[in-house]
Structures are given as C-alpha cells and as structure tokens.
Image (tube, grey):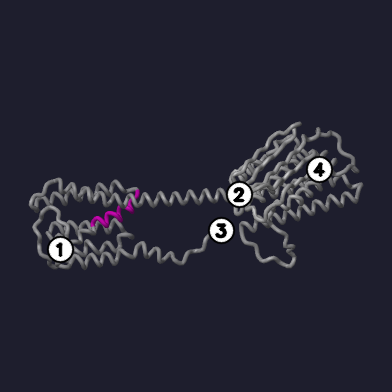
Amino acid sequence: MIDPPRPAAPWRRFAATGWYLPFAVALFAASLLPASRAYGTRLGGVPTHPFDAPAVVVVALQCLPLAVCRRWPFAALGLVSIGFAADQLRGYHSPAGTALPLALIVAGYALGRHRRAAAALFTAAYAVLALALSRLGSGQSPDEYVTFYLALVLACGIGVWLRATRAAEAERRRRVAEDTRAAERARIAHELHDVVTHHVTAMVVQAEAARYLTAAPDRLDQALTAVSDTGRRAITDLRHMLDLLAPAPAPGPGDTGEAREPAAGRLLTLVEQTRRAGQPVEFTEEGTAPESTGSADLVAYRVVQEALTNALKYAHGSRTSVRVRHGDGEISVEVGTDAPPAPQDAPAPQDAPASQTASASHDVPRAASPTGGSGRGLAGLRERVDVLGGEFSAGRGTGGGFVVRARIPARSGS
C-alpha cells in the first residue's frame, strides 16, 4: 500500500534549506560592523587595509553565495573562494572569511564522481593564493599555510562524511524495506499455500470420488454437496486473505458474517471436511483454549490443516489421528498418518464407497514427499512455529507412517 504524500514535506524542505539565506545576510551585515573586524581571518600577513567601497563588494562576494550553496554548491564555492582570495590579498581580513569552510562543507556533501578533480583544482588554486600572499605579506612560514589548508580539508571532509552517512542510512532503509516486503510476500505465500492447497486438494479428491458414484444418486449428491461446501469455505478463507491486504467494505445483505480468522476452535470443522473427502480421521482435543492466545491458535490450525492436506494427497484412505492439547501457556499438536495402502491397478466399481474410489484414482500422487513440491508446506510451518519460540518436527513414524508434532507457546498478543 502506497502512503499518501505527507503535508509536512514542504516545511521539511524549508527547514533543510531555508536557513542559508538568513545566515548569509546575517554574516554579511556582521562583517561590515567595525567592531567585528578584529575577529576576521588573517592569512599571509598582508597589512590590514581600511574598509572602502571595494571591501563591501568583497564581503558580499563571500557571504551572499551561501544563500544558493545548497542548490549550486560548486558555483557558490567558486564565488566564495574568489571573494576570500580578494579579501586576503587586499588586506581587509573581514569575518566573512568564515563563509569559506561553510561552503566547503556543502560542496563536500555534494561531491560525487568528480571528487578528485575538484580537490586537485581547489588545491592548485590555494597554492597560487599562498604564493601570492607570501610575496605581498610579511613572509609567514609554510607551516601556517599548511595548517590553514588542512583546516579547509577538514571542513570538506565533514561534508563528505555527512554524505556517506546519509547514503549509508538510505541504503539501510532500502534494505529494511526490501526485507520487509520479502517477508510480507513470504507470509502471504504461506497463507495462500495453506488455504488454497487444502481446499483444492479436498475438492479434487471429492470430485474424483463422485465420478464413480453415478449408480448411487444419494451418495453422488452427498459428494457434490461436500465439493460445494469446500469451495465456499475456500472462498471465505480467500476473502480473509484479501482483507489482510486491503480492508474490505462493509458486509452486505448476503454476507453470512462467518468468522474469517481460523482458530483452534474451528479444528473440528476442518476434521469433518477432511472426513467428507474420504479420509478417516480421529480427533482428540484436550483442555480448554483460553480466550486470547495471540497468533498461536492460527499457527496450530495451519499445522493441522497442512498435515491433513498431505494425508489426503499422499496417503488417502489411511487412518489419521489428530491430537490437540491446550496446556499451560502452550498448544501441543500431533497429527499422525498410517502408511498409505498399496496402489490398486484395477479401476474401482461404480458403486464403491467414496473412501475407496478416491483412493483408486491415479490423478492424486501417492509416492511423493509429504512436504509437497512447493517448498512452502511443512517448511513454512516450521518457520511460523520458530517465530513464536516453539518446537516443530515432521518425519516418519512407526510402521512407515508420517507424524507431525508442534509445540506452540500461547501467549496473549503473541
């Protein structure tokens, strides 16, 4: 979902750039005050010259470009540098020289691919200025020129450091946003896998069973009704998924108002649906689920749902047991499925029960891995349980069957 534009953005841009103009004007006015001339920058030992009309121009050339240094940093730095050189060569030594390190900070922040060329050009210009000042001045030692140059390099380095810091922060935010989007896509993929795979598998098994019930209208109607109920439940769960992505409108007159979010209390409905698909399931629930378990009940529901889906796909007709225990602060789930029966080569008779005919269909894989082929089945459940700090295991049981176990901490708001 794209966030709408923030109304405060123009004010933020003004806060980032609006102080340059007032500061430039204030520095220009302060540099013209007679009392502030004793605090000016003095480089090269040129004798002090009293302020005159050209001095105002020199001071303006140093201060006023700061007003546009954010937009045109290099042009502003060039004008400030020319003004600073004229200030020192003429001997005004005004406080406007403070503008030079400030312009260097902004230029250092804006430096990109041409950083080395700009540094070489500025160094050459400074060397020419130092040579001219050494001839006009009282002969300062080279150490003073080097010290002042290093101070200017430090100012430029501050700008470069600010640029690198901001770039690193932008990169960190970009990675966080990408990781967040990837995690959200993975979560939605897991939800869609859990919802769609279970319901569609049940519908396929029930539809295959209905093909052999043409001679038994009562059982054919029962099988088709089970397919319809499974389809409606799939639509309900898919609507719940869509509601997570975008808020749904107010319920209409035809909305049944059924709860969208699966919970541990709906496990019996899930078991009954699997039984109607021809899978013999024994369901046992111990203890009483608390009113609020956070997301633990949803994860428990998904564990049972995925295990029953795999039982329908890879061991249809085999006995399956589901045990759910609500303990002190946790939910324990165990789903065990016996080994699938041997494949039948001969087609089932038309009047065979649904639990036998569906197992005879060759459209449903029987020797595939119980984790499924998408990589989002039991592996996705393991991730969900691990996020809540629980334990998850899935593997072969006794007698060649398959057992899925999960211990899920059930904390309010988890």
Would residue 228 appear left or right of 158 to someone viewing this image? right
Q: Pointer 3 and pointer 4: residues touching (CB < 8 Å)?
A: no
Q: Is residue 214 magenta?
A: no
For mark 1, what is the residue? 37
Would residue 313 appear left or right of 14 to someone viewing this image? right
Q: Which residues are magenta?
A: 100-112
Q: Nearer the viewer, residue 408 or 340?
A: 408
Please tell me whether mark 1 sits on a helix, a strand or a loop: helix
Q: Nearer the viewer, residue 265 or 51?
A: 265
For mark 2, what is the residue? 187
Looking at the image, is mark 2 or mark 4 earlier in the sequence? Answer: 2
For mark 3, what is the residue? 1
Looking at the image, is mark 4 or mark 1 earlier in the sequence? Answer: 1
For the residues marked 4 and 1, what is the alpha-carbon distance in whole angstroms?
A: 97 Å
Determine the residue positioned at 34% across, 52% down: 162
Please tell me whether mark 2 sits on a helix, a strand or a loop: helix
Query: Nearer the observer, disc 1 or disc 3?
Result: 1
Determine the residue positioned at 77% across, 36% down: 338
